[in-house]
């Protein structure tokens, strides 16, 4: 039992999902606080999902203003310029999100996330980053890992027909029902983002999704070129192919493992594609709900989707030292 | 992703969405964001509070309004320049005919029931319009593309029948809580508040077995000299006391079973409980009356004691008579009718208590009685995304790349979203191929009416059937028939098949057509004298719509050992003989059991669910992936 009984209003509203994950999980959701950075279309989908699910609060951070691109896949921003005046993306999305569920507190936080201190991050149970540079991802991930309480950390990125989710639940313990009355305690250790992406490629199983490698090449390219995430054009392809060569050499991976065509798609189609946003935002929503409700097996630690083959894959990128899958106490 | 060619195909496309519920809301949003500009959407439902946890286009203030219309308005807020045409209507209405369907480039289903899915499937086949079918339940979901002549149609694979229980289990020997729910809902509730003229096994059985001299018709009538509480207590004592005593007198029944305990109201509730002003209160709106409220029971998740259940039983009965008197005689159980749920919960619990079955909360009882499917926004969002991906392939005529995709709860070989190649049409599908069905029936005893109700409507899902033997029409439904024909058809209905003007006997081939669905099939008639009452309650057996090979392969564990079909709760399935149906409407279901598919992982994910839910995860908003093994397993056993 967690916290107070659900109210009549909550039971009526959440009826169908309480039947799915139970009243205890719903009570834990009600106490949870979520921080979201980067209001992309995928994040808009995610926010819709967790606001509907009934978390306690969602805090949005995004200092950018509306551009045509930010409108394209984000249904939280209404196409009415009169609304935009002086408002950040976070504030605009906040206004729309509030309507989805009057029981959830939605707020927009101003300021540069890199200046936020421990006391800020400590308020949250889950932190979700999108549209974030490599440096920022690492920095915030480390910040979350140093807090006195565990915080679930996620990054999410969609480019064209592809999407990727990274999960860091640190040292995650949960229990699950194994037949009738028997519960078993499970424990999963996660590597940090930096640890995960530093795992030598040759140390990974041969059948790891090629999309994982391709995303690392693009991420590294944007980082060394000082680009914002998603800011690549087709003219960057030669540079990216060069970087692929270098990375493959250091990692003893055959270059052909990362197909030109895949890299070309990722370089060219950098805008979000709404069906992919819905899919990735849905999976991410489900993972965050799992982690904060303690219900269900969370994925470890990458989820990759490509509409070209339609596969939604889980990859465990943790190397020999980073713990391996579910352990049992 | 969005090439010029693709974008213009999207912009030109005219799409029909059927269903504006859980999947529908997500789908309409994703279509609009993806650039679709001409979307038509049909949904007959109005918005309920329990929709709001996932149907995100709707708000509290929209409760009671048309889903199709509110969804349109909500999406136009963020995409004001596209055209969305809503129809607050049933897709089975005659205006949505083949010509209507032909206007569309693709049809996208987000439906909640088998019946409508089959109807749309046939119209899409007749109009030769591609159909993208979908469904979700809990964390599970799937998307399929049906393209006439290229991939299987929705009905190429067998569909599960509604879960049913033998009458005697319900009336005399319940062993599970669900049996008590069926009894409370389909027998007791129907008897007290529903159509009095309908057949009902409730008192038939009690007088049958006990040879009671009581006039059974009178028991459930309120007598002139009693007040509502006296009446309620008399009903209580009759069904929970007297009937149990009568049942106990048949010793044979209890040889290998625990004997039930008769319960009388005076033993549970000593004092009179009715407020004296009860009778003078006026009729109120359905939603406002609650026995829980008047008894100060707050939490629907609590399990009430026998005394509390008894109080709720009497109070709910009193409230029905004092506040909703006008509806009595016409009520059918509705999961959104609070008072009905309270009454059924209480009655089921008292019965459960009598039979030593664990009691359940109102919340749980409501789920069982209403066949409520658990549902969440995330799965619907994922499925809607997958539908749009397939719909765009359809528009681009990307015929080699269609995928049937499963959304799983637990990954299988690392896959959480699992694409599978679509299957070819089933050559012996009675819907999309021209393979005849065959019917075993006693042609001398069965009437044409039985054939129409049980087979043509019940099994084949036709709405406007025409039944022909060669060129002669035996029966027809339509709006523009001549009076004399109507009279002839009405007379034919009451005739045995062999006595029809053009007799139907062994060897006859009947043609059955639905004009609206533009769907026709042949049925070979075979006379058979005897039918097993428990196993073949229809008194006729239709075959040819379930393929034997599918059954076999489905039940074979896969070579890789992932199949866990041995862990299925087979006990329930054994009771699958037809009699009392627990569902009024069968839930939409999609098959997961293709013979060539490696779908052990779907079975596996299904097995994680609680057995109690497995029986019933049907109906309401979204489809159930899973019941399929149930029907197949059942079929195999039969």
Image (cartoon, rainbow, N blue to C red):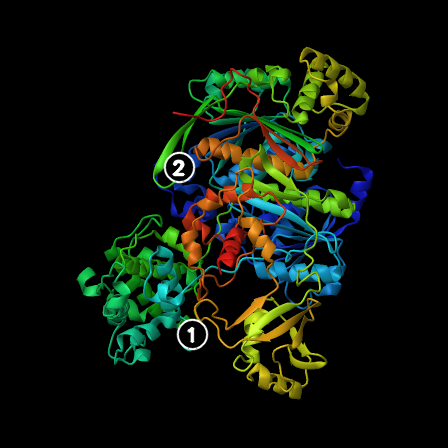
- Is residue A2 something one can see in this rendering? no
Vertical placement of B136 versus A80: above or below? below
Q: Position of residue B495 (x, y in %)?
A: 56, 84
Q: Quadrant of the rendered structure where residue A241 is?
A: top right
Q: Nearer the viewer, residue B223 or B626?
A: B626
Could you say which disc has been placed on residue A304 in the image? none
Marks 2 and 1 on same chain: no
Q: Residues within 10 Å of mark 1 (few under 14, many from 20)?
A: some
Farthest-out residue, top: A250
Could you say which disc has been placed on residue A177 in the image? 2
Q: Nearer the viewer, residue B398 or A1?
A: B398
- Is residue B388 something one can see in this rendering? yes
Farthest-out residue, bottom: B484
Q: Which residue is mark 1?
A: B195
In the image: residue B491, left or right of residue B105:
left
Vertical placement of B446 versus A124: above or below? below
* Chain containing mark 2: A
Q: Position of residue B559 (x, y in %)?
A: 56, 39
Vertical placement of A49 versus A158: above or below? below
Q: Quadrant of the rendered structure where residue B589 is?
A: bottom right
Q: Quadrant of the rendered structure where residue B155 is?
A: bottom right
Mark 2 and 1 residues: CB-CB less than 8 Å, in contact? no
Q: Nearer the viewer, residue A160 or B290?
A: A160
- The N terminus of chain B - image quarter: top right
In the image: residue A288, left or right of residue B212:
right
- Residue in view at x 18 percent, y 62 percent: B267
Q: Secondary structure at mark 2?
A: strand
């Amino acid at each position: 039992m967690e916290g107070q009984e659900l109210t009549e209003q909550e039971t009526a509203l959440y009826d169908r999902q309480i039947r799915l994950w139970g009243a205890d999980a719903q009570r834990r959701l009600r106490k949870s606080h979520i921080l979201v950075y980067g209001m992309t279309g995928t994040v808009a989908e995610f926010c819709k999902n967790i606001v509907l699910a009934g978390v306690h609060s969602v805090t949005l951070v995004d200092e950018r203003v509306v551009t045509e691109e930010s409108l394209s896949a984000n249904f939280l921003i209404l196409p009415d310029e009169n609304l935009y005046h002086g408002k950040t993306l976070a504030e605009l999305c906040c206004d729309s999100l509030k309507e989805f569920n009057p029981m959830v507190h939605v707020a927009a936080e101003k300021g540069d996330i890199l200046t936020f201190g421990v006391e800020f991050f400590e308020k949250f149970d889950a932190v979700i980053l999108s549209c974030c540079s490599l440096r920022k991802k690492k920095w915030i991930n480390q910040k979350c890992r140093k807090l006195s309480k565990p915080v679930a950390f996620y990054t999410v990125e969609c480019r064209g027909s592809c999407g990727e989710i990274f999960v860091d639940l640190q040292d995650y313990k949960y229990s699950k029902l194994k037949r009738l009355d028997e519960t078993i305690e499970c424990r999963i250790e996660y590597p940090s983002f930096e640890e995960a992406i530093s795992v030598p490629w040759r140390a990974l199983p041969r059948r790891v999704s090629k999309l994982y490698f391709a995303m690392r090449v693009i991420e590294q390219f944007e980082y060394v070129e000082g680009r914002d995430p998603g800011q690549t054009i087709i003219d960057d392809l030669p540079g990216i192919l060069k970087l692929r060569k270098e990375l493959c050499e250091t990692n003893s991976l055959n270059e052909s493992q990362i197909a030109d065509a895949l890299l070309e798609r990722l370089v060219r189609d950098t805008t979000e594609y709404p069906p992919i946003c819905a899919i990735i935002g849905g999976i991410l929503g489900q993972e965050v709900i799992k982690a904060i409700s303690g219900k269900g097996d969370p994925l470890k630690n990458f989820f990759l989707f490509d509409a070209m083959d339609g596969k939604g894959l889980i990859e465990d990128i943790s190397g020999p030292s980073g713990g391996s899958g579910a352990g049992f106490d | 992703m969005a090439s010029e060619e693709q974008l213009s195909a999207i912009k030109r496309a005219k799409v029909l969405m059927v269903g504006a519920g859980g999947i529908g809301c997500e789908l309409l949003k994703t279509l609009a964001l993806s650039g679709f500009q001409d979307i038509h959407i049909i949904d007959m439902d109005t918005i309920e509070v329990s929709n709001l946890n996932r149907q995100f286009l709707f708000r509290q203030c929209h409760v009671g309004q048309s889903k199709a219309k509110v969804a349109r308005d909500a999406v136009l807020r963020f995409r004001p320049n596209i055209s969305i045409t809503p129809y607050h209507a049933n897709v089975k209405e005659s205006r949505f005919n083949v010509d209507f369907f032909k206007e569309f480039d693709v049809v996208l289903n987000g439906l909640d029931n088998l019946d409508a899915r089959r109807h749309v499937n046939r119209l899409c086949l007749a109009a030769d319009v591609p159909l993208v079918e979908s469904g979700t339940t809990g964390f599970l979901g799937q998307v399929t593309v049906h393209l006439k002549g290229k991939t299987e149609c929705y009905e190429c694979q067998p569909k599960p029948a509604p879960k049913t229980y033998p009458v005697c289990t319900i009336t005399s020997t319940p062993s599970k809580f669900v049996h008590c729910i069926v009894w409370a809902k389909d027998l007791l509730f129907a008897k007290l508040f529903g159509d009095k003229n309908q057949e009902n096994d409730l008192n038939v059985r009690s007088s049958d077995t006990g040879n009671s001299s009581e006039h059974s018709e009178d028991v459930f009538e309120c007598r002139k000299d009693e007040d509502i509480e006296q009446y309620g207590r008399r009903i209580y004592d009759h069904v929970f006391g007297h009937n149990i005593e009568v049942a106990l007198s048949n010793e044979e029944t209890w040889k290998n079973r625990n004997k039930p305990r008769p319960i009388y109201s005076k033993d549970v509730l000593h004092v009179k409980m009715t407020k004296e002003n009860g009778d003078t209160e006026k009729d109120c709106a359905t939603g406002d009356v609650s026995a829980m409220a008047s008894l100060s029971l707050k939490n629907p998740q609590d399990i009430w004691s026998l005394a509390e259940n008894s109080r709720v039983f009497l109070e709910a009965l009193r409230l029905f008579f004092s506040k909703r008197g006008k509806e009595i005689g016409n009520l059918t159980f509705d999961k959104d009718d609070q008072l009905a749920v309270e009454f059924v919960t209480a009655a089921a619990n008292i019965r459960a208590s009598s039979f030593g079955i664990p009691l359940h909360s109102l919340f749980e009882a409501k789920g069982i009685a209403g066949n409520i499917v658990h549902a969440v926004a995330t799965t619907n969002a994922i499925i809607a995304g997958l539908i749009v991906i397939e719909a765009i392939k359809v528009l681009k005529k990307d015929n080699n790349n269609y995928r049937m995709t499963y959304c799983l709860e637990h990954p299988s070989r690392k896959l959480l979203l699992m694409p599978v190649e679509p299957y070819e049409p089933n050559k012996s599908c009675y819907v999309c191929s021209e393979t005849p069905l065959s019917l075993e029936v006693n042609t001398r005893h069965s009437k044409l009416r039985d054939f129409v109700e049980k087979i043509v409507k019940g099994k084949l899902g036709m709405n406007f059937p025409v039944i022909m033997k060669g060129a002669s029409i035996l029966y027809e439904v339509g709006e523009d028939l001549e009076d004399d024909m109507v009279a002839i058809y009405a007379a034919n209905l009451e005739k045995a098949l062999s006595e029809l003007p053009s007799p139907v006997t062994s060897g006859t081939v009947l043609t059955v057509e639905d004009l609206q669905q533009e769907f026709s099939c042949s049925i070979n008639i075979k006379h058979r004298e005897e039918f097993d009452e428990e196993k073949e309650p229809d008194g006729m057996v239709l075959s040819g719509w379930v393929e034997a090979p599918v059954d076999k392969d489905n039940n074979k564990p896969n070579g890789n050992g992932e199949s866990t079909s041995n862990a299925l709760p087979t006990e329930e399935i054994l009771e699958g003989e037809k009699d009392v149906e627990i569902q009024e409407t069968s839930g939409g279901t999609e098959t997961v059991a293709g013979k060539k598919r490696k779908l052990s992982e779907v079975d596996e994910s299904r097995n994680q669910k609680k057995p109690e839910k497995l029986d019933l995860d049907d109906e309401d908003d979204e489809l159930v992936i899973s019941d399929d093994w149930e029907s197949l397993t059942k079929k195999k056993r039969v």
